[in-house]
Amino acid sequence: QQQVKQSPQSLIVQKGGISIINCAYENTAFDYFPWYQQFPGKGPALLIAIRPDVSEKKEGRFTISFNKSAKQFSLHIMDSQPGDSATYFCAASMSGATNKLIFGTGTLLAVQP
Amino acid sequence: NAGVTQTPKFQVLKTGQSMTLQCAQDMNHEYMSWYRQDPGMGLRLIHYSVGAGITDQGEVPNGYNVSRSTTEDFPLRLLSAAPSQTSVYFCASTPGQGNYGYTFGSGTRLTVV
């Protein structure tokens, strides 16, 4: 019930291409879906987040698409750059008393020049 | 603002030893959490706190203790280290109830031999 499933585990994209990472959840009480970006040796950093009352959110080259009925959300990175090479984590939480953040297993993205 | 500060950055322990991982934040955040990161498993919640004096267990609490005597500090104690606790540990904080992003520290890489 608390799981967030993420795919693929790893992804190789050519510079300028589109990177797509998918996540699925089971608990319909989740109401906040952030994506985190992590570079080697660093802690995860918040990249972009969405609430279930919207189907899409865009910030620069990064877009979250959200499908509430399918309980799925995805991260799209347009015009992928070598500097985007990192591990990406989706996550979900329930606002309220605990606000615990549950993470997916991560996707290692490599953008080839 | 320093954000979330974790010490030490690296630590090697022998099986059976105990130690405390330190975490401090200077953002006056109410909520703090400890995660461990293992290859292929994402970030798993160990313990969390919703305020000074209030802590609760996450997904993988066994072998770890926490306390929260002040808003700023949230130390994680390993009672009797085991090789299975070899991992990278991250502390994170968020303002409180509601949907806000978590700010992560830079992590502690722990090896238990």
Image (cartoon, rainbow, N blue to C red):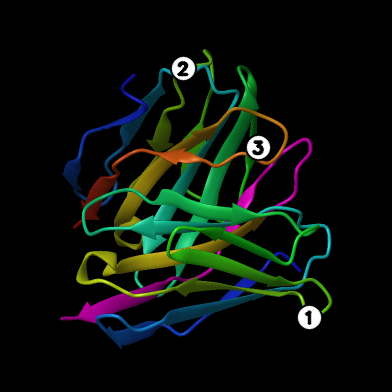
What's under tag 3, amino acid-wise? Asp
Q: Residue at x 75, y 43 (%)?
A: A95
Using residue B26 as the reference point, say whether residue A70 is left or right of it: right
What chain letter is assigned to the residue under label 1? A
Which image quarter is the N terminus of chain B in? top left
Horizontal and vertical percent for residue A72? 69, 76
Q: Residue at x 78, y 80 (%)?
A: A70
Q: Which residue is mark 2?
A: B72
Q: Which residue is mark 1?
A: A70
Horizontal and vertical percent for residue B104? 41, 41
Residue A106 in the magenta stretch? The answer is yes
Using residue B12 as the reference point, say whether residue B62 is left or right of it: right
Whether tag 1 and tag 3 are in contact, CB under 8 A, the answer is no
Foreground label between 1 and 3: 1
Horizontal and vertical percent for residue B59? 60, 56
Against B40, residue A90 (above or below) is above
